[in-house]
Image (cartoon, rainbow, N blue to C red):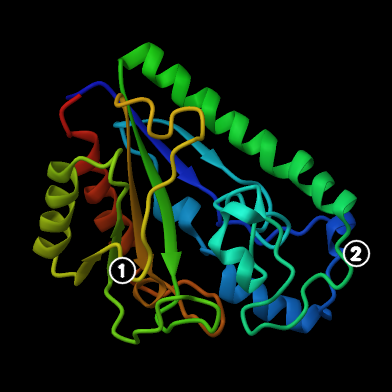
Amino acid sequence: MPSPNLLLHIPHSSRLVPPKERAQLAPDDQTLGLELLRMTDAFTDELFAPTPLESARVVFPVSRLVCDVERFPDDADEPMALRGMGAVHVKTTDGQPLREHLTVAERARLIDTWYRPHHQRLTDAVDQLVADQGSCIIVDCHSFSSRPLPHEPDQDPGRPDICIGTDSWHTPAQLRDELVAAVSARGFSVLVDRPFAGALVPAKQHHRELSVQAIMIEVNRRLYMDEATGERLPGFSEVRQAVSEMLAVAGRYPH
């Protein structure tokens, strides 16, 4: 068996909004609950179960409504900031206010409290894995709504079961193709970089370290959960097994 060099990044699995952060959010509890249901990659910390090929995982502990660590920290660099959904969201999925009076100081506090420490943990984990194993494969772990949410750029209703996201510099074509083949062999529909594209790599290594490779795996929520209630479907364990097989493909990639 190859030495474990997978690093799982799980940024959006939490629904937790600490009381101090809840006070900054405009919606009432019922509206906020619906927004959390839409925006949380529910159960991805369980769906992407540990495997022998995993060396480490970095899980963001609070909701992306507190701070979205998959965005660029500077709104000038982040396309979704134009929709009010940069690293600190100010709009909901349907364009209503999430934060009504976000000050420069409050935004800086959120970035310093949540964003920068998370990315430092991720960067350190990548550095350690490269030092120990000579290489690292980051698997960016997500799920997505079966129907396009209003804020999403891709509004095509024909969504696949699995989306594989790539980075032109950090995703080897062979790894991408082997994952697509494995997903298809399992009977799932699959698209590359649709409806979501990219694969996160820390800024320190981004487009600098060829020893750091990355791929994103996104699972359609209709496969494993009731999107109206947030409850697991009876087939949850089967989907988790299929995800483990995808991780095995990534973990066996030559390094």
As drawn, is 91 to the left or to the right of 46? right
Q: Quadrant of the N terminus?
A: top left
Residue 102 x/y as whole percent: 85, 63
Q: Residue furthest top?
A: 131
Residue tagged by mark 2?
23
Circle 1 sits in a helix, a strand or a loop, which is it? loop
As drawn, is 232 to the left or to the right of 118? left
The residue lying at 36 percent from left, 25 percent from top is 209
Above-or-below relation of 131 to 111: above
Residue tagged by mark 1?
194
Question: Of the numbered discs in the image, which one, if any, rests on residue 176?
Answer: none
As drawn, is 233 to the left or to the right of 43? left
Lower position in the chain sequence, tag 2 or tag 1: 2
Residue 195 x/y as whole percent: 35, 71
Few, some or many residues within 10 Å of mark 2 (<14, 14–19, 20+): few
As drawn, is 35 to the left or to the right of 247? right
Total residue callouts: 2
Q: CA distance from mark 2 to mark 1?
A: 35 Å
Few, some or many residues within 10 Å of mark 1 (<14, 14–19, 20+): some
Tag in front: 2 or 1: 1
For badge 1, the amino acid type reads Arg
Residue placed most toward the observer, 232 or 64: 64
Q: Quadrant of the C terminus?
A: top left
For badge 2, the amino acid type reads Ala
The residue lying at 44 percent from left, 82 percent from top is 148
Residue 117 x/y as whole percent: 68, 34
